[in-house]
Amino acid sequence: MIYFIAFAFLISILVFVHELGHYLAARSIGVKVERFSVGFPPRLGTFTSIPGGWKVNLFFFKKNKDGKLKWLPIFNTTLKQKGKKGSGTEYCLSIIPFGGYVKVAGMIDESMDSSFDYKPYELMSKPRWKQIWFMSAGVLMNTIMAFAIYTGLAMNNGVVPVSNLPIIGEVVAGAPAENNDMRSGDIIKSINGKNISSWENLVSEVYPRPNQNIQLDYIRDGRAKSINLKTSYQMNFKGDTLGVIGIRQEYRPSTFSESISIGSYRTMQGFGMIIYSIQMLTSGKAKFDQLGGPIMIGQLAGEAFEMGFTYYFGLMALISCNLAFLNILPIPGLDGGHIFITLIEGTIRRPLSLKTRMLIQQIGTVLLLMLMISVMINDIGRLFG
């Protein structure tokens, strides 16, 4: 149950932030927002902005005029707010918690709307740069969210090296360094006879030597010592095998400006991991059946939640990067697909026909559904071993 709650909360927050970007962008350019839903139908409650206040509806099963049980309003009232103009926007809280959506006036999209009238409040009546601003706002919000989370984690947990000298700040339990009696404060002087003057020198000598014997010279309390040890290994996000001996630098808490720098770096690193994953898939180094879908994300979310909020919100930030990157790709049905169509119209200096737009969106929707089905098959196969 905890896995389901962790997954539902993570996805709901990410999609809410994404759609909030579209909502705020629409309002900023004078486009009417017809509906802003947290979650997917059926609706539990709606709050509609009307002149002079709010119209409130609550929904549940109820018999209609024919005596059939239908999901209908069971309670409605009006909350008065003097001087309120009323935008006509319906704010919904819906049952299915995995996301949400924004519906704006005059947009031909995956909701299969098939007409618009070029009214001043419709998206298609706006200049193309405003349309692109609206379409890219969700991606921008997810990127800002990832940066904000990474920066917040850095402010709470973030650390930076005290110095760049090859001084051991911490020894990892059970690692080769501990097994050879290395301690915090030891100063590493050379590896295999090569002088070590900085932490970068140390890393550059150890990383290329996984599971290898090395001679390591260091100083403790002013006395020179020398040992022979066998390195261990670890994998980086690119899949490379790196040599390690199980030591860390001496760290101190990060300042506000350093936290911002760490947040920026980790956000860029998040996008870099996605790009590298795509390169792995296209080059054949990784297989399609290694891709994960909702079930895999749910498992990761549950495991991260159990490990602590630092891991959970770190995963949320990484998936936010994923959501931003995938949505900006020029795939019909995604934000990037809408932007691509708008750029085409700008290039040819005329709008595409409604029939052409609908065909492109429907093809994109089918492709996305096929991808979703494929990754869910991978999930199910992985789940059952």
Image (spheres, helix red, strand yellow):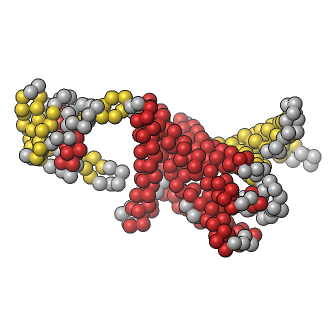
Q: Quadrant of residue 157?
A: top left
- Which quarter shows the N terminus? top right
**200 with respect to 314 (left or right):** left
Q: Residue furthest right?
A: 65
Residue 133 locus on image (x, y percent): 65, 54
Vertical relation: 28 (above or below) 164: below
Q: Residue furthest top?
A: 221
Residue 379 locus on image (x, y percent): 49, 54
In the foreground, 321 or 187: 187
Residue 73 locus on image (x, y percent): 84, 40
Residue 123 locus on image (x, y percent): 74, 57
In the foreground, 366 or 203: 203
At 11% from the left edge and 25% from the top edge, which residue is drawn?
221
In the foreground, 86 or 13: 86
At 22% from the left edge and 41% from the top edge, which residue is drawn?
199
At 57% from the left edge and 49% from the top edge, which residue is drawn?
140
